[in-house]
Image (tube, rainbow, N blue to C red):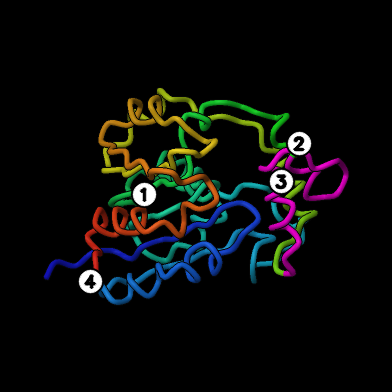
Amino acid sequence: MPSFPPILFLHGLATTTKRTWGDNGWFDLVHEAGREFLPIDFPGHGKEFIPPAEFNGNLVDYVNERIPFPIVDGIGFSLGARVLLELALERPGKFRKLVLAGVGDSLFQSDLDRGKKISDAISGDGEVEDPESRYFSQLADYPDIDGDYIAKYLHGKNSSIDPASLSSLSIPILVVLGENDFAGPATKLINALPDAKLVTLKGVDHFATPKDFHFLESALDFLDSAPSW
């Protein structure tokens, strides 16, 4: 039986490793497949508390410093997928394969207004009118989420990824996007990646993606980790 590297799991904004991956059965199935895995919580999320004054805002460096293995596979959802992609650009030899879920062509757009709306909703500084901001506001009410920290992060997050930079990524990448996900479409993203495949989750929105069975099945199969059903 071939040996595969550990799987790095990164969650989305205003949630945690446990809620995104653990509660939806990912770790149980990966363990059943005989794979080692490495879940990392971002600062202000879950058990990982770092005072904002002690964190420079660079999640790519933060994650890279916490990977003790020379090479890994990676699964990221939403913010976690973006961080994986940025880390792969900086450290192209770090990954064997990547699964990017809940991201699409919006990676190439800088949307400061959207970030401010979500930030204001989380911090309670504005009226929560749109469903997306309302959802993140509800997530930030969990006791293991530092809403002020996340709001500060969003205020400073307005950069976009250059599509041309992705041409250097030769590793296999699976992009998984819900049919009703606001991050889509993913046409430009797929075209910018040299070795990428798109899986579309029918009738699924952004927030239902981590628990979707088709996502789970497609991702684990792609990473050579499909358990014996």
Mark 4 residue type: Trp
Task: State which region is magenta.
Answer: 118-143
Closer to the chain start, of discs 1 and 3, is: 1
Residue for badge 4: 229
Is residue 84 magenta-colored? no
Closer to the chain start, of discs 3 and 2, is: 2
Q: Secondary structure at mark 1?
A: strand
Q: Nearer the viewer, residue 45 or 15?
A: 15
Tag of residue 116: 2
Residue for badge 3: 153
| In this rendering, position of residue 5 left or right of residue 204 | left
Residue for badge 1: 99
Closer to the chain start, of discs 4 and 2, is: 2
Mark 1 residue type: Val
Q: Residues within 10 Å of mark 2 (few under 14, many from 20)?
A: many
How far apart are the alpha carbons under marks 4 and 3? 41 Å
